[in-house]
Amino acid sequence: MLLQEKLKDIRIILGSQSPRRKELLASMDLDFTVEVKETDETFDANASAVAIVRAIAEAKLNAFDSAAYQDALVICADTIVVNEEGEVLGKPRDLAEAKAVIASLSGRAHLVYTAVALAFQGQRFSFAEETKVWFSTLSNEEIAYYVDRYQPLDKAGSYGIQEWIGRIGIKQIAGSYENVIGLPTARLQQELKRLV
C-alpha cells in the first residue's frame, strides 16, 4: 500500500514553524497540522555536526512527549550549515553578519545537515542527511543585494538555496536539494515507510 494511503487516517504533526518545511511536507501529499513548541536550541560546540543537529531535532521532538500525542505521527527537524573549517554557521544575528557569512562561503564548498526526529505510537527515531554545496565566487554587490532584499535572518548559513542567491550563486550540489531547503523528502519517505 502507498505510504500516503497508510497515513491518511493518522494525525500528523509538523513540529516546525519553517514555511519551507511546511511546503516540502505538503509536496509529499501528506495531510498535517503545524504545531510549534518552545525548545532550547543550545548545543555542545565540541560535538560533531551530526550530533548537534540530531540533538536539536530530538529536543524539539521531546517537547511533544505527552499522552496527547501518543497516537500522532510527530515530525521535527533542524538544519545546520558547516563551513570547510568545521564551524557550525547558525542563523545570523543581523544583516552585517549575514553578509560576512555569505562572503566566507563565496567560492568555496560547505556542508548542510538536516536532522529529522520522528515519533509514532511509542517508537522514536532520528536521522541526519548531508548535502555538499559549492558556491560560485560572489561579488560584494551580489551579496549585499541578496541580503538587503531577502533578509535571510531566519536561515542557517545566512541563505536560502531556493531564493535568488541559489539561482545565481550555487554551481554544484552533491546530495538532496530538498535537504538544503530544510527537509530531505526522499529519505523521509523511506523512513516513514519503516516506521508505520
Image (cartoon, rainbow, N blue to C red):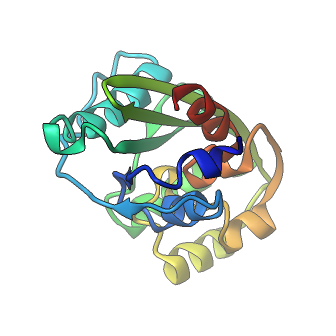
Screen quadrant of the N terminus = top right
Task: Give left or right: position of 61 versus 156.
Answer: left
Q: Residue at the location (22% across, 33% down)?
A: 62
Q: Residue 63 or 71: which is nearer the viewer?
A: 71
Q: Residue at the location (65% across, 63% down)?
A: 27
Q: Residue 107 or 150: which is nearer the viewer?
A: 150
Q: Residue 184 or 140: which is nearer the viewer?
A: 184
- Give the image location of residue 19, x and y in percent: 46, 68
Kindly give the residue lying farthest to the bottom in the view shown. 149
Q: Quadrant of residue 55?
A: top left
Q: Residue at the location (42% across, 33% down)?
A: 117
- Give the image location of residue 29, x and y in percent: 63, 61
| Count of number-bearing discs | 0
Q: Quadrant of residue 70?
A: top left
Task: Give left or right: position of 165 versus 22.
Answer: right
Residue 176 visible to the viewer: yes
Task: Give left or right: position of 156 versus 167.
Answer: left
Q: Residue at the location (25% across, 39% down)?
A: 41
- Give the image location of residue 159, x and y in percent: 56, 60
- Give the image location of residue 4, x and y in percent: 63, 51
Task: Give left or right: position of 23 versus 71.
Answer: right
Q: Residue 65 or 143: which is nearer the viewer?
A: 65
Kindly give the residue lying farthest to the right in the view shown. 171
| Location of residue 57 with respect to 123 vertically, above or below | below
| Location of residue 196 with respect to 105 vertically, above or below | above
Q: Quadrant of residue 146?
A: bottom right
Residue 105 visible to the viewer: no
